[in-house]
Amino acid sequence: MPLFRKVLVANRGEIAVRVIRTCRVLGIPTVAVYSEADRAARHVREADEAVAIGPAEARESYLSIDRLLAAARAAGADAVHPGYGFLSQSGDFADAVKGAGLVFVGPPGDVHRRMGDKRAARRLMATAGVPVVPGYDGDEQSDAKLVAEARRIGWPLMLKPSRGGGGKGMRVVRSEQGFLEALAASRREARGAFGDDAMVLERFVERPRHVEVQVMADTQGRTVHLGERECSVQRRHQKVVEETPSPALSPAQRETLCAAGVAAARAAGYVNAGTVEFLLSPDGTFSFLEMNTRLQVEHPVTEAVSGLDLVRLQLEVAAGRPLPLAQPDVALRGHALECRLYAEDPHHDDLPSPGRVLHLSEPEGPGIRVDSGLDAGSEVSVHYDPLLSKIVTWGQDRPEAIERMRDALRRTVVLGVVTNIARLRAIVEHPAFAAGELHTGFIEEHLSELSPSPCPPLEAIAAAAAALRRRGDARAGARRSAPDPWASLGAWRLGEER
Amino acid sequence: MRLRCGDRSFDVEVRDARDGVEVRVDGRAFRFALDPVGPGVFVVREGARARTLHLVRDGTVVHLSWGGVAYTLAEEREGARAARRLDSGALEAPMPGRVAAVRVVLGQRVAKGEELLVVEAMKMENALRAPRDGVVRAVHVSTGDAVAPGRPLVEIE
């Protein structure tokens, strides 16, 4: 008996494809949803059926609870997998799915809400004995109170909107002088973005690492961790390269950190797959940052070292089954890396670069996994996240995983849209990366001045010219009555010197 | 032909050679054999070494990947176009586009290679040059005109 009659995947792109694959293996039929921009997308074609849910704008399609539920009802789905992003951390969506008599593959709505409020989450963690960054998470939000708390915490400090994410409204304040001004700006941004201007103050940690713990909890009260991931290589609070295990942790530190992750999940009353994010200071102390109440983009590295299928575990837990393994059964082997391939231009301020993928060649080979939602011909739309695909490599140790990643990136070809492949290569080929000397400012410190995109070497230009002529030949041959003038002229003349 | 990369421009000449082609890029010669493998993929053989070239064309823009690095080149086609029109002295629009500039007037004496007009296509400006020395006998378009491929633009006598 399959776990569900039919699963609706409320997402798009590579994660929708990835969820569909596990469902297929488990014998569960799938329903894809798509906006007008995604009519022919890969996730639409890989699902058993697909339902149109509206125009390209996410607000009217992938973010529309009503339309998603209508699609689920129409298709006869009995479960909804939210993927990541979009509505995956929406308590309202989780509740609405449940209210419609369907199963939400993720934690219940109240858990999303509890962990989505930074003040509440911090207080909860502190009472559960999980270390938090020294700071202020109280309800009193007057200027005078915040100034007093800021003095107590010390400079520099971090201003964070209590509700929010994606770095919006976050500010580092270096001294008391600029504090009130920064506070006003952060409040303004938070009000605009999240409709709530409550702030959290936290001591700013210099050169921190970002380390997170993957947890998995079932409805019968069992919570396990599947090790940690280090995601320090970031660009504007956006992860770029992730790995497991973290090269920064000793076995003893790892055990403490992962136990803290499990404690955090238990305190939150957590169910299903979740991730507890921590900041790791250069002195080795760690503190709770936030909890992501969903499957994480970088979950494949955990799958690579654990041999587990996290989406399968999610579906089993959602179906009410007990976790099939206890903590001692979790065996992590080797090292895994993930590089996120984005349609953005590292030579131009990382601006998203929409367009059509004209040619695509994805790497394969021992220890290489590519999670992709792309096809040659795919339109990269301005409406959605610029993440194109994820390249994951596994090795028996970190150097082997890095070597495989270097090789995989060299063999990744995307033509037609500008991607960050050159930056990914620069990162994994950097000596500081090989040494595991990572922190969240790694890219700014080592690679902010990525050398300008070079012109091809002369031999490549020669090969390109010969290839262009070959194509011209082919066309001229196909339409003999009207030869392509470009292909038959000057030094290109057909039959010349034959 | 000319291939442009940013503000650098490369003069390229391709001719058949024994067992392949000889390509001169800015005077430097490369000899190899090139064969298509599949859509957008070519094998480049040089002695015992075979390498992969990925290449697709989008209008006059050429996207290629060589040695794991992606590059973009622009084809400058006016040389070929000019050569083709040696006999008639008439210059036609090489691609659908918009006339961005007309540099000559009726009766003007022009030298071979002189820029006659500029056609904008695919967000790139393409200079169209005189195929030979002569006098401008007709100017069929003005700045801002949309042109279809093959439409006569300028005639030189």
Image (cartoon, rainbow, N blue to C red):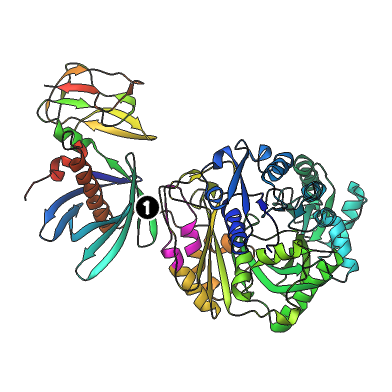
Residue A215 against residue A80 in the figure, above or below: below
Element assignment for label 1: strand
Q: Is residue A127 visible?
A: yes
Q: In the image, B152: left or right of A451?
A: left
Could you say where residue A290 lies in the image, as x and y percent from the top left?
Answer: 77, 61
Which amino acid, by three-letter code, is at mark 1?
A: Tyr
Q: In the image, A242: left or right of B21?
A: right
Q: Quadrant of residue A243?
A: bottom right
- Is residue A413 on the magenta stretch? yes
Residue drawn where x is 59% and y is 72% of the image:
A304
Q: Quadrant of residue A245?
A: bottom right
Q: Nearer the viewer, residue A239 or A451?
A: A239
Q: Is residue A150 visible?
A: no
Give the chain of mark 1. Answer: B
Residue A303 against residue A110 in the figure, above or below: below
Q: In the image, A433: left or right of A125?
A: left
Would you call the spot at circle 1 few (<14 residues within 10 Å), some (14-19), or many (20 or more)?
many
Q: Nearer the viewer, residue B91 or A227?
A: A227
Could you say where residue A29 lies in the image, as x and y percent from the top left?
Answer: 62, 55
- Boundaries of the magenta span: A408-425
Could you say where residue A181 lies in the image, as x and y percent from the top left?
Answer: 79, 45
Could you say where residue A44 lies in the image, as x and y percent from the top left?
Answer: 56, 47
Residue on which disc 1 sits: B71
Q: Quadrant of the N terminus of chain A?
A: bottom right
- Is residue A411 on the magenta stretch? yes
